[in-house]
Image (cartoon, rainbow, N blue to C red):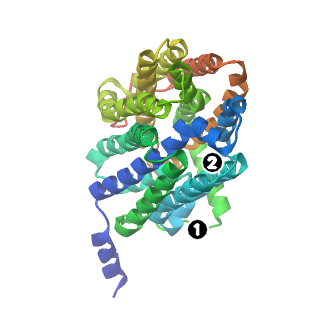
Amino acid sequence: MSASTGAAVRERRASGWVVLLILFGIASTVEAFTVSHVFRFLPLYLGTVRVAPSEIPAWTGYLNATFFVFGLPLVPFWGVWSERYGRIPIIARSAFVEMVVFGGLWLAQNRWEAASALLLVGFQLGNTGVMLTALRAVTPQGRVGFAISLFGVSPSLGFALGPVVGGWLVDHSLVDLHSLFALDAAMSLAAGVLLLAFAREGRRPPAPQGSAVRLAVEALRLTLSTRITLIVFGVFGLAYLAVQIANPFLPLLVVRLHGSSAGVAGQIGIVFGASALVGAALSPLAGAAGDRFGFKPMLTGACVLAAASLAGLALAPDEVWLTVAAIGLGASTAIAISMVFAVLATAVPEERRATTLNLVLLPIYFSSIAGGVIGALIVRTGLNAVLYVAAAMSVLAALLTTTLPGYSRSGKTSA
């Protein structure tokens, strides 16, 4: 078979953008569904692995920070390796790492075994950027914004369904928290196998030459030497720092208002499932609004809404108020992420776009580490102090958005 014939066969067998969108959407939803159980039920889970109640808030913050520590140095390499060895295996790798993490949480009998499992989460990083790059490569020019907005729904959908379903299963004694993580391990395994079995990426550019270290450093240089990328990463980093300062402790707000341990897992699921569900619904709508009104004002508004929602969480007198404020926070997060993805997919120069998208979540990783540590230190003075500091960070992010040029999804600058 000639080289040209082989290339034609590979091209015919490549998945279309709709198929990749569906498969990546399933994988992203499963990832968010399962990971949400860690984020939302970690304070309850720590009580099952012999952490004293007085130590749970601090342990919650520190463990949320350490999720990303060990995997962070590898983040620039996943994009390089995906171009060299294939994007689908690198994406599927995340699902298999998650399987190992959840299996460890299922079997853990003390805090140290649980912490050891959670430290492996860092090796799951780097899949979202690779998915965006693979999807962007096969999507027709006129459908790029639509495809990215739809893909943006999947994590919000997973974070909506995960706490609700998990909380219901635990509250109805169908599973305990350890068994819930066993189910998560099985779902992660299924997602990885699904990707390897059915996803076929389109043509990639020739594999980059040179050592992986040199290529990873060059990828960072290209990404961080573009003015628009630096500003967007700065806004994204500050906005997510605000979320991550508060996020690990939000379930404790439900516990504080609920007043008892009976049914608290289900209540946590309802409060934060509702917030994520609204976020999922708003993601494509935010993309359409960004087309019409500009990405910059939408991003600014998302940061302001986050600040107001975080303050509202601190002042919530009951669970209804808490749910409304959580919905506002979920909506602001979904809008901000959609706007960041849209700006980077359209405003970054073509020669740097794939590299930038591969590293799109780098600000989240740094913010997650810093946010967990800052939150763990502040929470010793009270839950409300954490929320007020997070609100102040959101205001700073809103101010930083004023330095952005106005971009529509066409890539044109607006006033």
Q: Residues within 10 Å of mark 1 (few under 14, many from 20)?
A: few
Residue 248: quarter of image: top right
- For label 1, the residue is 209
Q: Answer left or right for 292 relative to 104.
A: left
Give coordinates of residue 376: x percent, y percent.
69, 30
Q: Which residue is at 36% across, 52% downward?
A: 26
Q: Is residue 79 visible?
A: yes
Give coordinates of residue 313: x percent, y percent.
51, 18
Real-space Cα separation, disc 2 to disc 1, in angstroms? 17 Å
Q: Nearer the viewer, residue 412 or 387?
A: 387
User: Quick one: SS at disc 1?
Assistant: loop
Type of residue at label 1? Gln
Residue 309 versus residue 194 in the image, above or below: above
Q: How many marks?
A: 2
Q: Nearer the viewer, residue 319 or 22?
A: 319
Q: Earlier in the sequence, mark 2 or mark 1?
A: 1
Q: Which residue is at 41% across, 21% downward?
A: 297
Q: Which residue is at 67% across, 30% downward?
A: 57
Disc number for residue 221: 2
Q: CB of mark 2 within 8 Å of CB of mark 1?
A: no
Type of residue at label 2? Arg
Q: Answer left or right for 350 relative to 68.
A: left
Q: Answer left or right for 293 relative to 100.
A: left
Residue 215: quarter of image: bottom right
User: Quick one: SS at disc 2?
Assistant: helix
